[in-house]
Image (spheres, rainbow, N blue to C red):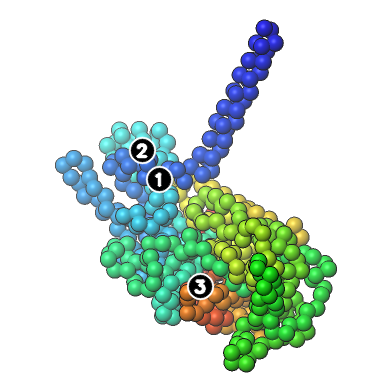
Amino acid sequence: MKQLRVNIRRVGLFICLLFALLALYGVYSLTNYGSRWFSTNANTWLRSAKKDVIPGDIYDVNGVLLAGSDVTETETGFTAVRRFNDDALIRRSLVHVLGDADGKVANGVETFMAHALYGFDQTIVERVRDFVSGARRKGDSLTLTVDSALSRYILECMEGMGVQAGAVVVMDWKTGAVLAELSCPTFDPSDPADSSGGTGDPYFNRATQGLYAPGSTFKTVTAAAVLSDPQLSSRSLTCTGSFAAEDQNGQLREITDAGTDHALGILVSHGQIDLRRAFRVSCNSAFASSAVQLTDAKLKKQAMAFGFDANFLFREIVVENSSYPEGARSPWDVAMTGIGQSTLQATPLHLCLIASAIANDGIMMEPRLLSRMTASDGSVRPAYGMRIERKVFEDPEIPALLREYMYDVVNEENGTGSQAALAGWRVCGKTGSAEVDGQEKTNALFIGFIDDERAPYAVSIVLENMGAGGEYAAPLAHDIFEYLIEHLQNAAPAL
Ligand SMILES: [Zn+2]
């Protein structure tokens, strides 16, 4: 009997402990990730707040008003209607960052940061003060890290090139601040009927939710894995223009170098080649065979260090998770993964984080959108600080080598990214031309950065069904870097 009582007490204590842990976890997840549940439609507090709080204004990094409110007094209270920037190009270039009044764009600032915009971060003192003075309650105003002039410029470039669908992300690789995040096709939030043409859903944010085959931009990850393996990294390869490996049915399948066309009798082969030159000329044969020699496990380990298969829970921005292929895989699958094809998937934002981490000695900063939060009385609220998302490399030597490889791609003879070069600056990058089933042309990709602390900018570009990355995405990277250098003094957001 006594033993039974002791046991009951132990079980009781154990259950109490579990509840305590659950409560702690609840507090932790609300503090860090509260915006995720807060911004759902199921939140009735938010729905009722929208009736009696004027939403805060939203500014870009230079203080340009992106979203204000037109307030009309009515007999029963008031109505507040969102008024966006006067410039249609600015509205369309930033609609996926901000979101729209109808909520068709998921996870824009309007919804994801609704707790601040609708005054839920206000103190009791502020609420009492507004109540006593009879002032209309107004939520906090947000100053974002994005630059509206840069965003407008990028949209102009993309439309000038005839881009039908795609995404561009520009970040500060030292701080994680997002300077631009564009998705095409887009639309005007002030005139939703006016979608810009293009192909696909204009409400879908391709920069943060679009999952793409990274193509040869993934060779940065494969190269990192090879460089971490002393036996493989010193090896010289012979490229015959193609590499054959067994698929899951035991059939030999070929991976050819770009430009090879058996039907036309064209064979591109690089002969004796080391990893550095293979990277510069984007040799598929060398990278496919390297991936097979590395093994799937080691390639996956390196991809996971870069954030593939991670559950991204950033505090200010919602990003779809990137994935490394699962399950039992044939040598051919692994070879295809080594060149960024197979079922690998990554968002443009994640690709920009990969470039940023290489630029920043292997340290990947959390992407940020919020520069400042200001209460309705003008006082600045304490905001989140910068945060390291992950350390991709323990050893700064490997990112330093990758920077040299990526420098060659842009600046050395036969480099595939030469059109990204910018006189006087160390532009580093990697091109990609990813094949997509059912698409006539490849997706054109480029990831890269300026290797200079005075201009710490990283970009990722994905242009759907456009052609070769070196031909279409690299020149756009050049234009963006050139713009940033010309406007250097404006482009450093406070975090
Ligand atoms: Zn080759």
Q: Which residue is mark 3?
A: 437
**Gap in Å between the C-alphas at discs 1 and 2?**
11 Å
- 380 relative position to 256: left or right: left
In the rendered image, residue 83, in percent from the top left (x then y), is placed at 30, 58
- Name the kind of residue labelled 1 in the image: Thr
Mark 1 or mark 2, earlier in chain: 1
- 87 relative position to 23: left or right: left
Dot 3: element: loop
Q: Is residue 349 above or below residue 408?
A: above
- 401 relative position to 207: left or right: right
Q: Which mark is residue 45?
A: 2
In the rendered image, which quarter contains the N terminus? top right
Mark 3 or mark 1, earlier in chain: 1
Q: Which residue is mark 1?
A: 40
- Name the kind of residue labelled 2 in the image: Trp
Q: Which mark is residue 83?
A: none
Hey, which quadrant is residue 200 in on the image?
bottom left
**Gap in Å between the C-alphas at discs 3 and 1?**
35 Å
In the rendered image, residue 14, in percent from the top left (x then y), is placed at 63, 23
In the rendered image, residue 256, in percent from the top left (x then y), is placed at 65, 81
Mark 3 or mark 2, earlier in chain: 2
Dot 1: element: loop
